[in-house]
Image (cartoon, grey):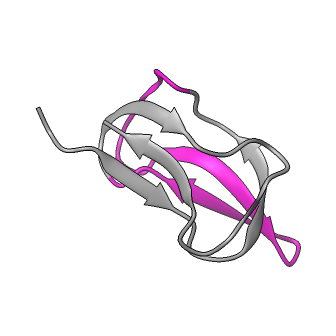
Amino acid sequence: MGMSEEIRAEMVANVWKIVAGVGDTVAEGDTLVILESMKMEIPVVAESRGTVDQLAVDEGDVVQAGDLIAVIG
């Protein structure tokens, strides 16, 4: 069993769209959520394969740099 991976925001942005849900199996590079900042869409991707154990954001939320977005188990 591997360790959980925390996916965190790299910048201040709006959560534009949630792509993956809790319980979804994701591969490395799969998009989890799409952030929007300064009219640019920024995909937040899984850095390893696993299952989405937690989504810490909702569409429309504003995240700060370092905020938890998701946990991959």
Residue 38: name its quadrant: bottom right
Picture quarter with the C terminus: top left
Q: Is residue 39 above or below residue 48?
A: below
Q: Residue at x 47, y 24 (%)?
A: 24
Q: Is 48 or 6 nearer to us in this picture?
A: 6
6 to the left or right of 35: left
Q: Is 12 or 34 nearer to us in this picture?
A: 12
Q: Residue at x 75, y 69 (%)?
A: 13
Q: Is residue 65 above or below residue 42?
A: below
Residue 19: name its quadrant: top right
Picture quarter with the N terminus: top left
Q: Is residue 38 above or below residue 17?
A: below
Residue at the extreme left: 1
Place of residue 17 in the rendered image (x, y in percent of width and height, measured from the top left): 76, 44
- Residue 36 belongs to magenta span: yes
9 to the left or right of 24: right
Q: Residue at x 42, y 51 (%)?
A: 29
Place of residue 5 in the rendered image (x, y in percent of width and height, measured from the top left): 32, 50
- Residue 8 belongs to magenta span: no
Q: Is 19 or 15 nearer to us in this picture?
A: 15
Q: Residue at x 14, y 39 (%)?
A: 2
5 to the left or right of 44: left
Place of residue 50 in the rendered image (x, y in percent of width and height, measured from the top left): 31, 34
Q: Which residues are magenta?
A: 22-47
How many dots with numbers?
0
Q: Is residue 57 above or below residue 62?
A: above
